Amino acid sequence: MKRELALARKDLDRVLALNPRVVAALRQELRMAFTRSARSEFATIAARAFALCPGCMQPRVTQQIGLEPRWGGSYAEMADAAAAAPTSLNPRFRMLPGYAEIDRANGFVTDKQLDRALEHAERACALGENVDSLSKKADILLRQKNALGAVAAGRRALELSPSNGEAMLDLALAEAEAKDWRAAYAHLSAGLRIRPASSDARWLLPKVVAGLSALGAQAHQEGRDNDAIEILDQAAELDPNREIQGRRAAVLTSGFHGQDAELAALEAAAQSAPHDVYAHERLDYALSTRHDWPRID
């Protein structure tokens, strides 16, 4: 890790040499400073970032995290830093004291005192909703087996930060616990595109695939074959395997026994819905059983 940090620091120094006003690079250097417990360097980089962009929220958030007790800071230092942020430049600075509440909530989660943890998460949210406070609230609610509450908090977090991959995956987990498999699929799939190496996503994936497979089977039993195929396609997107493909084929080909009346019904369905992929797949299957290759699209 030391080697990787040294390489990263070299790259960041090069970025700042080319353009000393890149606040995003300074934020990354802030992170590296507090992980190395380089307190004086941390303060210098923070001051430089604030001078360049006194109204920027993210450097202030990084400062709050770097001042947490686990990194050698204290809640008093976090409070002083939050109070020093000029709310006249950015009203969102009023949410900064919430990061101390989030850290306190983390401590109570570790101690399995979930009610107290939720109290601190709620205090953070009361200062103003943001993705960090809402995600912590969702995490605690999920640990309390309140999946629907976690879903509500997670959805609000994602509304505030729509491209946040971690928020997507957190929401997918809550939706899976609530057995809302199609919503879980949507957010897991999107989250994996942003964070393909996420171990949490890889752990969640087989659970969502199993839920989608069961949901597809239920749709087929209820006669909703198009829904069943679509759901199985979603499962296969996450985990393409023979079992799911076999189930999909069974649904697609069900109800056809080679009769002329069945073929005529399939042709009529395809003609009436030219954009229905599944209707045309069924017709193609029926035609293939008769070796009527020229008529297959």
Image (cartoon, rainbow, N blue to C red):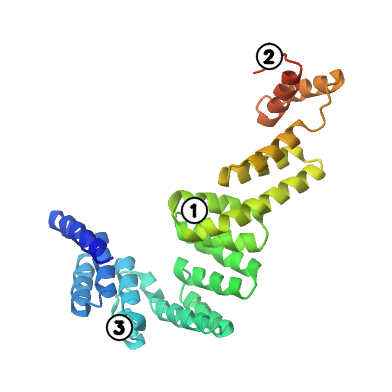
Look at mark 2 in the image and give the residue it sits on: 293
For the question of whether residue 241 can be seen, the reply is yes
Residue 144 sits in which quadrant? bottom right
Please state which amino acid type lies under the numbered disc 1.
Gly
- Seen in the picture, residue 81 relative to 204 is either above or below; the reply is below
Looking at marks 1 and 3 on the same chain, the residue that comes earlier in the sequence is marked by: 3
SS label for mark 1 = helix
State left or right for residue 264 relative to residue 293: right
Residue 223 sits in which quadrant? top right
Q: Residues within 10 Å of mark 2 (few under 14, many from 20)?
A: few
Please state which amino acid type lies under the numbered disc 3.
Gly
Please state which amino acid type lies under the numbered disc 2.
Trp
Looking at marks 2 and 3 on the same chain, the residue that comes earlier in the sequence is marked by: 3
Look at mark 1 in the image and give the residue it sits on: 191
Q: Residue at x 13, y 57 (%)?
A: 17
State left or right for residue 297 relative to residue 158: right
Look at mark 3 in the image and give the residue it sits on: 72
The quadrant the C terminus occupies is: top right
Between residues 93 and 250, which one lies in front from this camera angle?
250
Which residue is farthest top?
294
Q: CA distance from mark 1 to mark 3?
A: 33 Å
